[in-house]
Amino acid sequence: MVHRLPLFDAEIAARCDQTAQAHPFWPCRAGCDHCCRSLADIPRMTQPEWRRLHHAFTSLAPHERDDVAQKLELLRNTSQSPFTCPFLDGERGSCRVYEARPLACRT
């Protein structure tokens, strides 16, 4: 079975680069975490995306895994919307699993 996820990642990255070059005001770049802080719903993912995300999660340092798990538990007990992605490192404003983020987050 050929894994197409890396091909999709590359296509999305190329489109995002083209958009950023054509529109310098485009906010999606390092340091922008607006979308991560205003999610209306959990991104839908395919099984390969879940596997990749799970591997990235289990590869995090223990204190980071604990922080993500704590944020997930808080989300489980609330119906708050929008919400902040539990993988967002709020202090740095960056994704803890950036290379493994779902396609929905890449777009």
Image: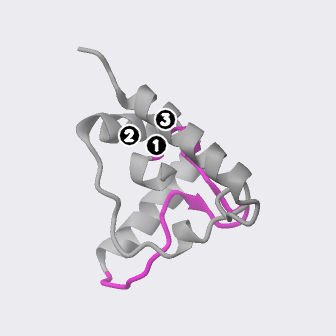
Circle 1 residue: 57
Q: CA distance from mark 3 to mark 2?
A: 23 Å
**Crowding near the residue tagged with mark 1, few <14, some 14–19, many ≥20 C-alpha atoms within 10 Å:** some
Residue type at the position of mark 1: Phe
User: Would residue 104 appear left or right of 89 to someone viewing this image?
Assistant: left
Taking depth in this image into account, of 58 and 29 the one nearest to the observer is 29
Taking depth in this image into account, of 93 and 30 the one nearest to the observer is 30
Q: Residue at x 35, y 59 (%)?
A: 43
Residue type at the position of mark 3: Glu
- Residue lying furthest front: 22
Classify mark 2: helix, strand or loop: helix
User: Would residue 106 appear left or right of 1 to someone viewing this image?
Assistant: right
Residue 54 badge: 2
Residue type at the position of mark 2: His
**Crowding near the residue tagged with mark 3, few <14, some 14–19, many ≥20 C-alpha atoms within 10 Å:** few
Residue 11 badge: 3
Q: CA distance from mark 1 to mark 2?
A: 5 Å
Classify mark 1: helix, strand or loop: helix
- Residue lying furthest right: 24
Q: Is residue 9 magenta?
A: no
Classify mark 3: helix, strand or loop: helix
Whether tag 1 and tag 2 are in contact, CB under 8 A, the answer is: yes
Name above or below for residue 66 compared with residue 101: below
Magenta span of residues: 78-101
Quarter of the image holding residue 50?
A: top left
Name above or below for residue 32 compared with residue 46: below
